[in-house]
Amino acid sequence: MARSRIPVVADWFAEEGDGFRLLGTRCSACASVFFPREDARCRHPGCAGGDLVEVPLSRRGRIWSYTDSRYRPPQPYVSDRELPWQPYTLIAVELAAERLVVLGQGAPGISVTDLDVGMEVEVVPGVLSEDGDDETGTAWTTWHWRPTGVVA
Ligand SMILES: [Zn+2]
């Protein structure tokens, strides 16, 4: 047994390893792409509305902006206050084909000194937090951004 891997949000991403993709939706009338996915109606102000169809987003994009989180956010952010705060990077990535900017954490070990605006990054599976023990606990999965060419 190992920790059960459960997406922290259902239907925002799928698969593991090289097949891992973020999932958005595309309007069949105006081709606008939404992430987080929009399943109710097209939000384009000039569109009369069409069917929203799930689409996998591009795996790679370019850094639009980035920063790091050097202090613990207030509650309801979930973290173990007994442990020292571990800074993480936040990266906003422009997906050219979708005309979207998607925010996400940098992969573990990536710091702001590794990053630059315009750098190519790819989406990879990540773990947001873990509950319980290694045998019966849960790993809450999410996506991370990682510079291309970096192998975990
Ligand atoms: Zn539309």
Image: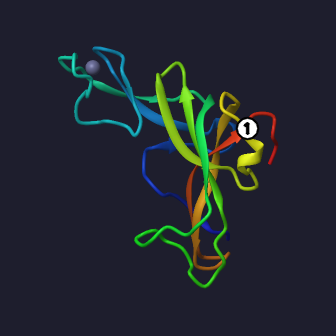
Indicate the quadrant where residue 109 lies. Answer: bottom right
Q: Residues within 10 Å of mark 1 (few under 14, many from 20)?
A: many
Which residue is located at x 25 percent, y 27 percent? 42
Amino acid carrying mark 1 in the image = Pro
The residue closer to the viewer here, 149 or 11, is 149
Q: How is the image coloured?
A: rainbow
**Up/down of 99 relative to 2, above or below:** above
Query: As drawn, is 22 to the left or to the right of 52?
Result: right
Where in the figure is residue 80, as x and y percent of width and height?
Answer: 57, 79
Q: Residue furthest left?
A: 48
**Up/down of 5 relative to 47, above or below:** below
Which residue is located at x 57 percent, y 34 percent? 93
Where in the image, quadrant-wise, is ligand 1 located?
top left
- Give the residue pinned by disc 1: 147
Where in the figure is residue 59, as x and y percent of width and height?
Answer: 61, 31
Image quadrant for the N terminus?
Answer: bottom right
